[in-house]
Image: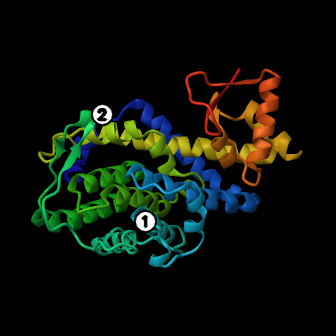
């Protein structure tokens, strides 16, 4: 809510580079319709891969992790509570339900308190926790870095939250309808204020990431279906938390600097579009065997430093065994090498020479 009181002040002095990055995102959005018509099978595969990655990554950011061999079983179908092995699996399944609620909707609802509490209820629907309620006790944003507890930020009280949250959604709605700024910037401000308010006792981070995906889809940025925004946030979680901390300082006084967070979010979305383009190019260029598709992607489209999981996401339908076979061949040919600064094993990083 604080970010929307004076948008001219909040969004003044926009970094020049962000304008360029936002333009790239808009260009990518414009290309999506063509891709949807031409590569339907690819997009169906990407959507399912992204669904699994998003559920897994957003849960892992909060320390909710499940055994790799259990992930596909948990995301495949809705399971009854007695089939879960522990609380982590229950919370994992709750994020699955909330994510499916968003991505399978034929029309994205407007942000509102009832809708947010509905998602929160889904998040904890398989646990004994009482989801779907605003906080009733003061909560704090704390850090345990170095083994010591330190309060980073004190959100508004439960009583204030009852008024601040609906006001936030109303101010956001008016700003979007009035085209007060770029829609991604307005969404970023809404998420920033939502996290600053910290409206529920548990699950605020997961809710914020769900609302980010919801908002992107609502504004027509369909890339959130095909590249996991949450996975990128997990991969860059140090930057994620640093940006939020930097932008929440002096938020209660309305004197905060929103640009660290907005810059981070814009970069994440730009990365998603870049990754999406790489996958589309790789698909169109791969008329040969699956091994040839892996070779083409690694040598022409992958980042200079990549992992097997990057290839897996870029080339749906290609098995890990095929990928490993081609990686070994490319290594033998001198095209790639293991990253000497990374660990060894199936998740190790590679460097293209």
Q: Is residue 38 visible?
A: yes
User: Which residue position is annotated with label 1?
Assistant: 86
Query: Residue 13: which disc?
Result: 2
Residue 149 lies, with reference to residue 215, above or below; the image says above
Q: Quadrant of the C terminus?
A: top right
| Nearer to us: label 1 or label 2 | 1
Q: Quadrant of the N terminus?
A: bottom left
Residue 234 on image: x %, y %: 46, 45
Residue 154 on image: x %, y %: 14, 49
Who comes first in sequence, dot 1 or dot 2? Answer: 2
Crowd band around label 2 with a 10 angstrom C-alpha radius: few (<14), some (14–19), many (20+): few
- For the point 44% across and 31% down, which residue is it? 17
Residue 100 on image: x %, y %: 51, 69
Q: Is residue 98 left or right of residue 207?
A: right
Q: CA distance from mark 1 to mark 2?
A: 48 Å
Q: Is residue 319 left or right of residue 288?
A: left
Residue 61 on image: x %, y %: 41, 49
Crowd band around label 1 with a 10 angstrom C-alpha radius: few (<14), some (14–19), many (20+): few
- For the point 50% across and 59% down, which residue is it? 55
Q: SS class of the residue under badge 1? A: loop
């Amino acid at each position: 809510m604080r970010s929307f009181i004076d948008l001219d002040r909040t969004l003044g002095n926009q970094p020049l580079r962000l304008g360029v990055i936002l333009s790239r995102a808009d260009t990518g959005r414009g290309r999506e319709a063509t891709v949807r018509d031409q590569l339907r099978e690819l997009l169906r595969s990407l959507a399912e891969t992204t669904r699994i990655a998003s559920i897994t990554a957003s849960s892992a950011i909060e320390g909710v992790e499940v055994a790799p061999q259990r992930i596909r079983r948990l995301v495949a179908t809705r399971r009854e509570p007695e089939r879960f092995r522990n609380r982590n699996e229950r919370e994992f399944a709750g994020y699955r339900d909330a994510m499916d609620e968003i991505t399978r909707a034929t029309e994205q609802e407007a942000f509102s308190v009832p809708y947010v509490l509905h998602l929160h209820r889904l998040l904890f629907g398989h646990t004994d926790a009482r989801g779907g309620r605003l906080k009733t006790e003061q909560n704090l944003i704390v850090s345990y870095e170095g083994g010591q507890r330190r309060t980073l930020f004190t959100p508004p009280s439960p009583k204030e939250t009852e008024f601040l949250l609906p006001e936030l959604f109303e101010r956001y709605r008016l700003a979007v309808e009035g085209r007060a700024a770029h829609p991604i910037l307005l969404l970023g401000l809404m998420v920033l204020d939502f996290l600053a308010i910290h409206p529920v006792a548990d699950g605020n981070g997961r809710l914020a990431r769900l609302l980010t995906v919801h908002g992107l889809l609502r504004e027509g940025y369909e890339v959130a279906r095909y590249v996991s925004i949450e996975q990128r946030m997990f991969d860059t979680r140090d930057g994620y938390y640093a940006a939020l901390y930097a932008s929440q300082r002096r938020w209660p006084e309305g004197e905060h600097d929103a640009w660290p967070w907005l810059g981070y979010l814009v970069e994440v979305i730009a990365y998603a579009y870049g990754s999406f383009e790489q996958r589309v190019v790789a698909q169109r260029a791969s008329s040969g065997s699956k091994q040839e598709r892996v070779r083409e992607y690694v040598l022409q489209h992958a980042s200079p430093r990549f992992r097997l999981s990057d290839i897996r996401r870029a080339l749906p339908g290609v098995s890990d065994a095929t990928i490993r076979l081609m990686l070994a061949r490319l290594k033998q040919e001198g095209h790639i090498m293991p990253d000497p600064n990374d660990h060894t094993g199936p998740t190790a990083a590679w460097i293209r020479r």
